[in-house]
Image (cartoon, rainbow, N blue to C red):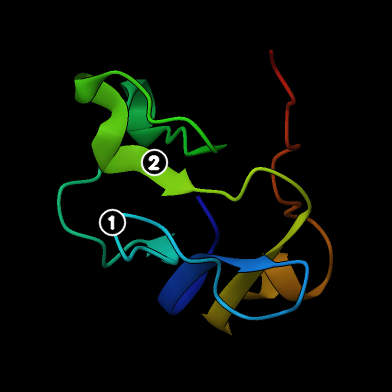
Amino acid sequence: LPPVRAFWSLTLYGADRYFAPNALNRYALGDRSPGLRYGPGRSLRILVQHRPPRASQRSNWLPAPNGRFLLYLRLYEPKPAAVDGRWQPPRITRTR
């Protein structure tokens, strides 16, 4: 998870740089998002996809448009590891 003193968020924008409309009206997920499901060792998997995932994964779903989009990871009051590059965001893995 991002090393921060305050909070972090992952926000999705459409190619036009505005929030991408979606049925959940959900445009970001972060450590303040209610209901996030963490894995072993507080790992976190966020699903960024157009089609809804199965019900058990929907709390970690960031709905994406069917096309191009932009993702922004914001760290509020980042700790030194994030500022000096010792911490790097996890890779985004494209699956089909």
Compared to residue 90, the image places residue 76 above or below, namely below
Compared to residue 80, the image places residue 34 above or below, namely above
- Image coordinates of residue 59 in percent, x first then y, are 25, 41
Q: Earlier in the sequence, mark 1 or mark 2?
A: 1
Mark 1 is surrounded, within 10 Å at the Cα level, by few (under 14), some (14 to 19) or many (20 or more) other residues, namely few
Q: Nearer the viewer, residue 83 or 95?
A: 95
Q: Which residue is mark 2?
A: 61
In front of the other: label 1 or label 2? 1
Left or right placement of residue 75 versus residue 84 in this view: left
Residue drawn at x 34%, y 35% as measured from the top left? 42
Left or right placement of residue 31 versus residue 49 in this view: left
Residues at badges 1 and 2 in contact (C-beta under 8 Å)?
A: yes
Q: Quadrant of residue 18?
A: bottom right
Residue drawn at x 83%, y 71% as measured from the top left? 84
Mark 2 is surrounded, within 10 Å at the Cα level, by few (under 14), some (14 to 19) or many (20 or more) other residues, namely many
Q: Which disc number belongs to residue 24?
A: 1
Q: For the residues marked 1 and 2, what is the alpha-carbon distance in whole angstroms?
A: 10 Å
Residue drawn at x 60%, y 75% as measured from the top left? 74
Name, please, the residue furthest toward the bottom.
77
- Image coordinates of residue 19 in percent, x first then y, are 55, 75
